[in-house]
Image (cartoon, coloured by chain):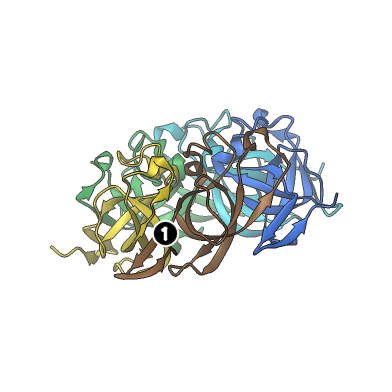
Chain colours: A yellow, B brown, C blue, D green, E cyan
Amino acid sequence: MILGRVIGTVVSTRKDDELEGLKFLVVKACDFDGKPTGAAVVAADSVGAGIGEVVLYASGSSARQTHLTKDRPVDATIMAIVDVVEVDGESRYVKDA
Amino acid sequence: MILGRVIGTVVSTRKDDELEGLKFLVVKACDFDGKPTGAAVVAADSVGAGIGEVVLYASGSSARQTHLTKDRPVDATIMAIVDVVEVDGESRYVKDA
Amino acid sequence: MILGRVIGTVVSTRKDDELEGLKFLVVKACDFDGKPTGAAVVAADSVGAGIGEVVLYASGSSARQTHLTKDRPVDATIMAIVDVVEVDGESRYVKDA
Amino acid sequence: MILGRVIGTVVSTRKDDELEGLKFLVVKACDFDGKPTGAAVVAADSVGAGIGEVVLYASGSSARQTHLTKDRPVDATIMAIVDVVEVDGESRYVKDA
Amino acid sequence: MILGRVIGTVVSTRKDDELEGLKFLVVKACDFDGKPTGAAVVAADSVGAGIGEVVLYASGSSARQTHLTKDRPVDATIMAIVDVVEVDGESRYVKDA
């Protein structure tokens, strides 16, 4: 999985039927501190993530293993909202309470 | 999924039988403003996308989950036409009405 | 899918049984004009492609969806021979008749 | 598979139900000597790996073939702890006994 | 598939049960002459490849389609030992008899 920060949304009305009801978020890969520094992808949201949150997203067929995305044509899905990233014994990112 | 702009077509008469009837479009990855800046792929079209439109495409096995591409040897499929891309609270791309 | 030009062959006698009878071609990713400029992969051939032809190849599990490659351990398969690549309204590549 | 060194953990309370009970570790791709030099991913742990250990992780659908990760939305899983890496006839990495 | 040269081995005693009996080899992507120049991966061996041999390996779910790797958590498998690589009409690599 990749750590990313949710920075936006994509709206689409003309799409494959299987996508009905899914929310698409723009996620930018981020470093351990939650700073968005990497590539951007558009991911389906399976956990109600909000703008600004640090999340984990899964790619490929694994992106279709959540309840919301089963058998749907999506190749990236946010499957967890991150509370803490600890690296080398140090808390690098902690979600605001 | 990746944001891309449709910039062309690929025509093929000699191909695997499973591809009959599919349309192949050249899609170039684009930034949030819809400007094509990234790598080009050839994607099957499942939504009737036209030249110049900003779209989302899915890769890998997820590209085979639309009605049109089920069980076919395609690894990239346009599954949505983009209306709006909003990033950091700003509408970066809005499809012409 | 990726546009590529067939530039060579790979011969192997000691291989997994499931590969018996498959032909392996060296394909180099090419630009819209058919000029090989990108990375090289070795792809199974499902359409009788010849050296020098511009083709489309699919990667990953999609490479196993042709009649010839079903359930075989190949992750790249040529599934179409390209006749025309048209980009920005211009025919960039046209196969010799 | 990729050689990596476990350098941290990611904690998440709000996540897809299918992820319950899985441990997420931060793994940085490493060279043959076990020095972390490459990209970082977050991987599910199927072998009880600890911080500092050199491991192998599998990506994509293969990450879902362990007992712990079957059918779960994870695209990277640590499936082995490395004892020895031998390259060009030389032991480059040996796990402390 | 990718052309690679086998340059080493990885030994692991603590691993997922499904990996029992598999041999892991370090493979470095090589050019058409068999010179290792690219990225290194650790691949399962399904053909009895030896150190120094030029091989083809498949990645992703295709790596699980050999008899030895079926349903196992491996994402790269050597499925062929290369005898000849011919590019642009020239034999670039020929395996020693």
Up the image or down, A6 lies above or below A43; here it is below
User: Going 65% across and 46% down the picture, which residue do you hit?
Assistant: C57
- Badge 1 local density, few (<14 within 10 Å), some, or many (20+)? many
Residue reaching furthest to the front: B97
Q: Chain of mark 1?
A: A
Horizontal placement of B20 versus C95: left or right? left
Q: Nearer the viewer, residue A81 or D23?
A: A81
**Percent position (x, y) of residue D87?**
58, 54
Q: Residue C94: which quarter of the image?
A: bottom right
Residue D89 in view: no
Circle 1 SS class:
strand
Q: Nearer the viewer, residue B5 or E30?
A: B5
List the residue tagged with mark 1.
Answer: A41
Three-letter code, disc 1: Val
Residue B19 in view: yes
User: Going 39% across and 40% down the picture, which residue do you hit?
Assistant: A18
User: Going 25% across and 49% down the picture, which residue do you hit?
Assistant: A47
Q: Nearer the viewer, residue E71 or C4?
A: C4
Q: Residue C14: which quarter of the image?
A: top right
Quarter of the image containing the C terminus of chain B? Answer: bottom left
Q: Residue C44: which quarter of the image?
A: top right
How many circles with numbers are drawn on the protein? 1
